[in-house]
Amino acid sequence: MHAWLCESLDGVDGLKWRELPTPEPRAGEVRVAIRAASLNFPDSLTIVGKYQIKPELPFVPGSEFAGRVDAVGDGVTHLKVGDTVAGTAASGGFGTHACIDARRVLPLPAGFDMADAAAFAFTYGTSHHALLDRGELKAGETVLVLGAAGGVGTAAVQIAKAAGARVIAAASSDAKCSFLKDLGADATINYASTPLRDALKSLTEGKGPDIVYDPVGGDLAEQAFRSIAWRGRFLVVGFAAGGSIPALPLNLPLLKGASIVGVFWGDFARREPKAFAAGMKQLLQWYAEGKVKPAIDCKLPMAELRAAYARMATRQVQGKVVLVND
Ligand SMILES: NC(=O)c1ccc[n+]([C@@H]2O[C@H](COP(=O)([O-])OP(=O)(O)OC[C@H]3O[C@@H](n4cnc5c(N)ncnc54)[C@H](OP(=O)(O)O)[C@@H]3O)[C@@H](O)[C@H]2O)c1
C-alpha cells in the first residue's frame, strides 16, 4: 500500500508519500481499499499537533474515507469482503488502504457515490447532531450558519433546510454567498464586507436568529450571540478562525433567555451509539430523497494532498475537497 505519512508536526512539509506494508486487520477491525477520502479541518490541526486527538508519530492522517472492505478481522460479523463502506477515524485515510474499527464503519446502500460517501458522515453527522439534537431545531425557526461555505457549514445549511428552517448563510466573500444561495440558503451575509449585527437585524426584523451555528469562533461569535433571538441556542461547533477561544459575558445569555450549547460529534458517536445510528439513518434517507448531498469543491488525485491542504488553509474551499485513488 501507499500512504501519506506524517513524519513530523511541520504541517504539509512533514508529509511524505511512502510505500508501507499492507496492514492486516486485528480482531474487531476491517481493512478498506480506499477509493476516496475527504479533507476535514481537524486534519489540518492533526499534522501540526494542535488537535485534541494526537496520534503518535509517524502516522497516516485522514479522518474520513470510503471504499470497499477487502479483509475482515476476527469477530466482525456485520461486514464482509466486497461491502462498500464509509469510515471516520482519528487517522489513516490519506492512503490506499486503512484498517479501522468495524464499529466506526457505515455500510453504504448500493450505488452510493464514493466521493459523496467520503464527504458525508463527519460533516453531516456533526451538523445533524448540532441542529436537531443539541439545538432542538423546529420547522419555521431561523438558523444563522457562520462559515457556511465550509464542510460542516454546507451540511448545516442543507440539514436546516431539510428540517423546515429559514437559513441565513454567512461567509467571507460574495462568491461564497452566491454559492450558498445556489445551495438553498434563503439569505446570505458577506461578513467581510457587511457588519454582521446590522445585516441580521434587517433580515430578521430585529428579532435575531433562533439558532446560531458557529464553527468559526473568533470575533464573529460574540457579535452573533448579541444578535440571537429570545430563547435562542448558540451552537459551539468549532474555532476555524484560530486565535484565542472566544469568551462571552454571562449577562448575555441571561438577558436573552438563551443557551450556549456545546457540540462534540466524536464523543456523541462513542457515548450514544443508538442516537448516533438514528441520526445517520435519517441522513441516509435524506440523501436518498435528494434533500442533502455533499457539495464537492473539487476532486484531486491522492498524490495532490498538499494542494488540498493549501486550498483549505487559504479559505478557498466551497464544500469539501475529496482525494481520490485511481
Ligand atoms: N464540534 C464538533 O464535533 C466538530 C466536528 C467537525 C468539525 N468541527 C470543527 O468545525 C470547524 C470547521 O470545520 P470544517 O471541516 O467545516 O472546516 P472548513 O471546511 O475549512 O470550513 C471552515 C470555515 O471557517 C471559515 N474561517 C474563518 N476564519 C478562518 C481561518 N482563519 N481559517 C480557515 N477557515 C476560516 C471559512 O469560511 P469563510 O472564509 O467564509 O469565513 C471556512 O469555510 C473546525 O473548527 C472543526 O474543528 C467540529
Image (spheres, rainbow, N blue to C red):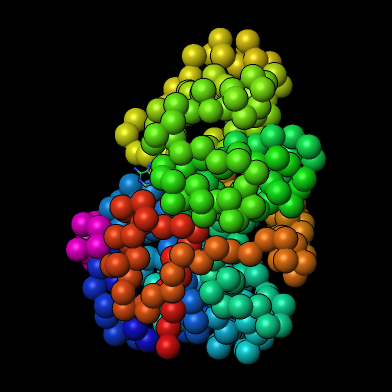
Question: Residue 105 lies in what quarter of the image?
Answer: bottom right
Question: Left or right: 47 with respect to 73?
Answer: left
Q: Of all residues shown, which one is farthest toward the right? A: 139
Of residue 74 and residue 190, the one placed in the foreground of this image is 190
In which quadrant is the N terminus drawn?
bottom left
Q: How many marks?
A: 0
Q: Residue 125 in the image: x percent, y percent? A: 63, 55
Q: Is residue 90 visible?
A: no
Q: Is residue 58 above or below residue 220?
A: below
Identify the residue at horizontal 60%, vertical 25% (top origin). 202
The quarter of the image holding the C terminus is bottom left
User: Is 38 placed above or below 220 here?
Assistant: below
Q: Position of residue 226 (x, y in %)?
A: 54, 19
Q: Quadrant of residue 201?
A: top right
Residue at coordinates 48% horizontally, 19% vertically from top-left? 248
State the image coordinates of residue 205 (x, y, percent, origin top left): 67, 22
Q: Relative to the observer, which residue lies in front, 152 or 103?
A: 152
Residue 313 appears left or right of 211: left
User: Height in image: 228 above or below 190?
Assistant: above
Could you tell whether 235 is left or right of 110 in the image? left
Q: Which residues are magenta?
A: 7-14
Q: In percent of the image, x 60 and y 56: which residue is there? A: 183
- Check if residue 11 falls in the magenta segment: yes
Magenta run includes residue 13: yes
Image position, residue 80 (x, y; %): 66, 86
Residue 201 seen in the figure: yes
Residue occupying image coordinates x 29% and y 71%: 5
